[in-house]
Image (cartoon, rainbow, N blue to C red):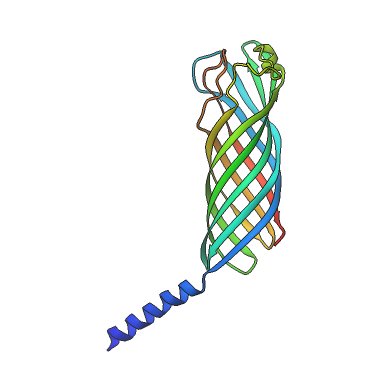
Amino acid sequence: MKKTILLLLFASAIMSSIYSQQTSYRVGIKGGINYIHLENYGKGLYSDFEAKPGYSFGALFEYTRGGFLNYSITPEIVYTESRTDVDLLYITNCMATIQTLDIPLTFKLGLQLSKIFRPYVLVNIYGSYMTTYYGKLFEMLDIDHTSSGAPINKLFFGVSTGMGFNLWCLQFEGRYRWNLVRINTDDYTALKQMGLELSCAIYFN
């Protein structure tokens, strides 16, 4: 009898947990700063790379499901400008500015600790298209950003991981990203972007 009662209580708890799950959809805008920089992971000219502050802004859509333990799927579209200070051989302060259109797809696992507070961890995959690149580095390498035949790869993808929290209609987030595809040039055979991103988003519903 005790086993039957315990089994019924356990089944009731499971059913209660299933039916207490909530589903929500939210749309918002986001912006932030980043320290995304270039690094050379192959043969090519020796250089030191130092991240300089950049910025980003965009829009996002979030689908969330669950109760106390919940998950979210968040597609975004983000415009990002990143800046790198490059010491090229014996030439210092060769700035490289890269602007990309990013489309991240983020997966979040969170805990609803109160009605307005939800911390979470995240991973995402993203695709990026380099819309513009300019600066002394590209001038030294004789790469003309206005030329369609410039020897540089403009399309790449990568992954990010990080954490954040929701506070009412606000979201604060930090994540670190790595390109998985090389940005090849004639002088650098394995340039990649990576770095820290900090952002704040506001949801409208």
Q: Quadrant of residue 90?
A: top right
Q: Position of residue 4 (x, y in %)?
A: 29, 85
Does 72 sit above or below residue 103? below
Q: Quadrant of residue 13?
A: bottom left
Q: Quadrant of the C terminus?
A: bottom right
Q: Is residue 196 above or below residue 139?
A: below
The structure residue drawn at horizontal position 50% and vertical position 23%, both measured from the top left corner, is 41
x and y, in percent, of residue 31 in the image: 71, 45
Left or right of residue 12: residue 99: right
Q: Nearer the viewer, residue 143 or 150?
A: 150
Tell me if residue 48 comes above or below residue 67 in the rendering: above
Residue 63's image quarter? bottom right
- Residue 28 is left or right of residue 161, and the answer is right
Q: Quadrant of the N terminus?
A: bottom left
For this orientation, the residue located farthest to the bottom is 1
How many marks the image carries: the answer is 0
Q: Position of residue 46 (x, y in %)?
A: 56, 14
List the single residue furthest toward the front: 148
Above/below status of 34 relative to 48? below
Residue at 61% x, 55% y is 62
| Residue nearest the observer in this picture, 155 or 133 | 155
Q: Position of residue 22 (x, y in %)?
A: 55, 69
Q: Residue at x 37, y 78 (%)?
A: 10
